[in-house]
Amino acid sequence: MALMLHSTPERGEIWGRIFNDADEAFFPSEAAVTDPTKITHIACWNLPADLDRYPNLATIICVGAGADHLRALPDGVRLVRTDIPSIAEMVRDWVVMATLALHRDMPVYLDQATRGLWRGVPTRRTRSCRVGIMGMGRIGALAASSLAALGFDVAGFSRSGHPIEGFQIYGADDLDAFLARTDMLICLLPLTDSTRHILGDALFARLPPNAQLVHAGRGAHLDMDAVQRALNNGQLRAAMLDVADPEPLPADHWVWADPRVIITPHVAAHTDAEEGAQFALQVVRAERSGMTPPGLVDIAKGY
Ligand code: NDP
Ligand code: OXD
């Protein structure tokens, strides 16, 4: 087995050291591969241009936690997403920051700051805010615990509705009930055929008026025009987004000028190079011993 990394030279150097220490075959770039038949694993965010070059390719390892953009692979090639604690922890941190920022009216204060306006709005306790997390996987469950520890009234929504101790979990059939009790909607879903554009008019209309949106999933979960409509008709009070449609967001997009939206440029998490390499090593070794690799994507489910 041999792994090729399709990334930056800096990451190639770090991965090279870790694979070398572990005595596993490693190529830091496409240019370093002289015999493509050796390559069984490719680790990347975006696929190399010509996968046909690698006739013995068995597994693509996405270096991020969401692998939606890599699902169309040649028959028989497996897809693994990087499932490491630091990614989940970084997104959890961003979500806690965003939830507190909206709960404590930061969009209002950031806007007032541009006009030198010193004026307070009423402050509410966290326990009066019903948080609803769409996507109670690795990241959603971690965010739920942290927000609950801050006093927020947290519930979750997942495809299966499988129970998570300490939280009321709504399943796919209970979306209406979940939305009706949600003042602060947090989206941490994977992007699949069933979740594309889920954050649209129909969903916003089922939230209580003046709800708020925190979104760190994928840009294509959003119908951006519907977000603007919901802000204008009072369905949404404010939103904090880490992802957008499209990315990068054009400089003349309405979002930049709207004080009700705070946006960061898809930075909730970055994959630590060392942890990413250690994870890829685990994948290679699990597959060599005939075990299911960690982070294996179920292509039929879409995540
Ligand atoms: P997981 O696969 O661990 O969890 C996904 C969750 O979503 C599960 O609870 C799953 O339900 C639920 N789900 C999937 N489809 C549906 C659906 N149609 N309806 C309702 N619930 C659904 O993913 P992670 O927690 O690791 O990551 C979630 C996403 O976060 C990633 O896919 C990526 O898009 C995004 N992300 C963003 C980052 C950023 O920097 N902004 C960084 C990392 C990730 P069930 O439990 O029943 O399977
Ligand atoms: C990821 C991301 O999926 O950075 O890890 O979005």
Image (cartoon, rainbow, N blue to C red):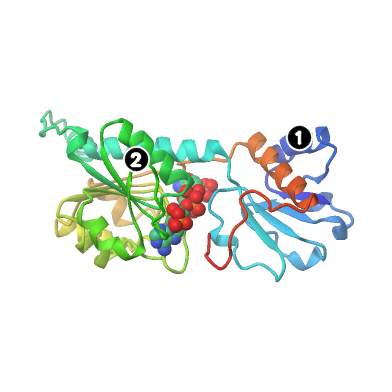
Give residue 245's position: percent from left, percent from top: 40, 59
Q: Secondary structure at mark 1?
A: helix
As displayed, is residue 247 above or below residue 201? above
Q: Amino acid at mark 2?
A: Gly
Q: Amino acid at mark 1?
A: Ile
Q: 265 or 162, which lies in front? A: 162
- Residue 128 appears in which quarter of the rendering? top left
| Residue linked to disc 2 | 166
Q: 135 or 111, which lies in front? A: 135
Some atom of ligand 1 lies within 8 Å of the CB belonging to the residue at label 2: no
Give residue 155's position: percent from left, percent from top: 30, 47
Q: Can the viewer see residue 253 in this picture?
A: yes
Identify the disc placed on residue 120: none
Q: Residue at x 27, y 49 (%)?
A: 257
Q: Residue at x 89, y 54 (%)?
A: 34
| Residue linked to disc 1 | 18
Give residue 112's position: percent from left, percent from top: 17, 35
How crowded pointer 2 is (Cα within 10 Å; few <14, some 14-19, many 20+) is rated as few
Q: Residue pushed farthest bottom? A: 75
How crowded pointer 1 is (Cα within 10 Å; few <14, some 14-19, many 20+) is rated as some
**How far apart in space, not on screen, are marks 2 and 1 (Cα)?**
39 Å
Q: 74 or 76, which lies in front? A: 76
- Residue 17 appears in which quarter of the rendering? top right
- Residue 67 appears in which quarter of the rendering? bottom right
Q: Residue at x 83, y 42 (%)?
A: 24
Q: Residue pushed farthest top? A: 118
